[in-house]
Image: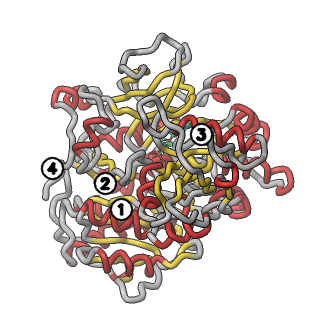
Amino acid sequence: MHYPGPDFTPWPPDVARRYRRAGYWRGEPLHQWLRDLAARHGDRVAVVGGEARWTYRELARRADRLAAGLRERGVRRGDRFIVQLPNVPEFFAVVFALFRLGALPVFALPAHRRSEISYFAELTGAVGYAVADRYAGFDYRGLAREVHAAAPGLAHVLVAGDPGEFTALSDVDAEPADLPAGPEASDVAFLNISGGSTGLPKLIPRTHDDYLYSVRASAGICGLDESGVYLCVLPVAHNFSLSSPGVLGALHAGGRVVLAARPAPEEAFPLIAREGVTITALVPPLAKVWLDAVPHRRPDLSSLRVVQVGGARLSDEVAARVRPTFGCALQQVFGMAEGLVNYTRLDDPDELVVTTQGRPISPDDEIRIVDQHDDEVPAGQTGQLLTRGPYTVRGYYRAAEHNAVAFTPDGFYRTGDLVRRTPTGHLVVEGRAKDQINRGGEKIAAEEVENHLLAHPAVLDVAVVAVPDPVLGERTCAVVVPRGEPPAPAALRAFLRGRGLADFKIPDRVQLVPAFPLTGVGKVSKSVLRSRLAAALAAGGPAVPPPATPPDRSVTEPTGGGPTTTTGGSGC
Ligand code: OOB
């Protein structure tokens, strides 16, 4: 199958011509880009991870051999291939091998489980699935077994490490002599995952042309050059760590990528000192953990030039601590896997760096800030952010119905973020209009969790909402109207796990209520629920029941938090 195909919403031809003429889209596919880097920087170290130190040449060679091995096994241009690799060097070999063949990596997060992966397999008709053997105490071969049983079309399960009954990545190896021509730069290169606000996760088709533009421009904005050393502590396949400027930005500059298996200070600080790391990217809760760890660990962070923080709103107070504590510049990053990325600039005055989330990459990023009728709000006022531009997609993959609401008829993406713009053109994120929880950078679509909970026999109705949290910014609360005997929160959690939902989506709290507050038109009023829960939490007690509720029917029970990432924020 050829991509772009019917599953891809192209930019209008005149717009595409404009982006080409402006030099944003250069007609260079990602595998060609890597080959050029290998020609230019051959013996320099490109990727460091665990014991491995791969040069540019080595990386390109591995990708080519793996591509030939995959081709021998039948992987073809246009095939989809789920890639759920943690921060290991093999990630690069696999994705560049797929790029070389024109097969599309479908990026999954290490935290995803059966529910998410099976859905990606079904939606994309993927032919393969690449995992590590074990990572962070979890055996991905067990997950692969379950997913494979439900999706037998996954003909190739490749494992970095001990493969068990599957295929070792290291065995997929052939002479790359007769590889056919690769894909076009205007083709879709991969499918990325959206944070989402709907019942089922959405996939984002990114082309070689548009993605490489964002990588090149980001590397420039972030001051990367050959001396740049990028420490990747967030999941490598996330848009922030992949391209903002991320690992690809570091490679573009001829610098070095250092992969951290875990984001905790005890792992990351020694790596910074050992490798002379110059730039890294954190989510706000992780930035706080690092800031708090500096005084007693006294690490050598003298090589750091920039610490980026993004993925969720960074408070001005924490932002102000970055430069004095780390001794380097802060860069705020407000981006999205759909495209648009904003950066504070390295020469911006401190005031802007601390209080705004930056301005767009491109002079051709179009920004509209609108009210509920899509009319522009007066300058400086808060409204919903709409955007289109040379690296923002025009539609999700195989989601025609959703695309009709997620994009305006003239192609603006409705980000669901509430922002205002300063006179300097910087954006300040003031809130969110989408039905999503941002749990320290990890995005949770309320509807997805609600749908799972509705399958429980003791759940009559449910609304999943955010509650404020001093560490993560937000946590999740499932407000449940029980059917008959009220379910125990622990049983609901176990139920969700049993359905194979990623840990970070499991509600932190469960609140039982007899009925929901309703809006004027009879819909559940999540804003009333949110403010009641927030007020009750601030008062330190169980949430206030809705009016006319017998107090003994309302129980708030913290369920102990989800994943271990609560203090590490390993996701975005
Ligand atoms: C990044 O990408 P996603 O796709 O996981 O999430 C995008 C959403 C945004 O629409 C916004 O709601 C939120 O995450 N967000 C922020 C933020 N950065 C992202 N909200 C407030 N302040 C920020 N600085 O999260 C992402 C992609 C590329 C670069 C950086 C982050």
Residue type highlighted by circle 1? Val
Q: Dot 4 corresponds to which residue? A: 5
Left or right: residue 535 versus residue 24 is right
Left or right: residue 88 versus residue 356 is left
Left or right: residue 335 versus residue 258 is left
Contact, CB < 8 Å: mark 3 with mark 4? no
Dot 1: element: helix
Q: Residue at x 33, y 63 (%)?
A: 119
Q: Residue furthest right?
A: 296
What's the CA distance linking mark 4 and mark 2? 13 Å
Dot 3: element: helix
Q: Residue at x 29, y 45 (%)?
A: 396
Q: Residue furthest bottom?
A: 165
What's the CA distance linking mark 4 and mark 1? 21 Å
Give me the disc on residue 530.
Answer: 3
Dot 2: element: strand
Give me the disc on residue 106.
Answer: none
Q: Dot 1 corresponds to which residue? A: 95
What's the CA distance linking mark 3 and mark 2? 36 Å
- Chain-order first, disc 3 or disc 2: 2
Residue 419 visible here: yes
- Chain-order first, disc 3 or disc 4: 4
